[in-house]
Amino acid sequence: MCDAQSATIKHENVNTFIGLCLVAPNVSIVMLHAHKGCLYDLLQNENLKLNIDFRYSFVLDIATVSSIFVALFAHIVQLLIFSIR
């Protein structure tokens, strides 16, 4: 799922992955700070008018990324469990 090329992607619309912490209870993903603000603030901004097609596209993108993170996390957990045994 992850290769050397994906680790070198640099683009203003892609939030850079820095690393992750697997030490309980602070399991977390560390990303580069998003200087343009968070997605929640963007979607809650009533002054910004987003048409239904844009919102639908956003929802699909979020669902896709979420499923990738779930699969990645499951893979990491499997690696940790098998390395302990």
Image (cartoon, rainbow, N blue to C red):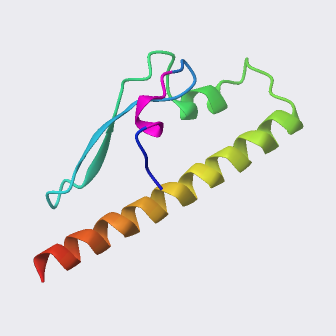
Q: Is residue 73 above or below residue 9?
A: below
Q: Is residue 23 above or below residue 39?
A: below
Q: Is residue 42 above or below residue 55?
A: above
Q: Is residue 6 left or right of residue 79?
A: right
**Residue in view at x 16 percent, y 74 percent:** 83
Q: Position of residue 56 (x, y in %)?
A: 80, 44
Q: Kindly give the residue lying farthest to the bottom in the view shown.
A: 85
Q: Is residue 76 left or right of residue 49?
A: left
**Residue in view at x 36 percent, y 26 percent:** 32
Q: Is residue 57 magenta?
A: no
Q: Is residue 74 left or right of residue 12?
A: left
Question: Observer-nearest residue: 33 or 4?
Answer: 4
Q: Position of residue 44 (x, y in %)?
A: 63, 31
**Residue in view at x 46 percent, y 36 percent:** 5
Q: Kindly give the residue lying farthest to the front in the view shown.
A: 4
How many numbered badges does the structure rendering display? 0
Q: Is residue 81 above or below residue 20?
A: below
Question: Observer-nearest residue: 34 or 8?
Answer: 8
Q: Position of residue 4 (x, y in %)?
A: 40, 40
Query: Which residues fall within the magenta stretch?
Result: 5-10
Q: Quadrant of the C terminus?
A: bottom left
**Residue in view at x 71 percent, y 24 percent:** 46
Q: Position of residue 47 (x, y in %)?
A: 73, 17
Q: Is residue 8 magenta?
A: yes
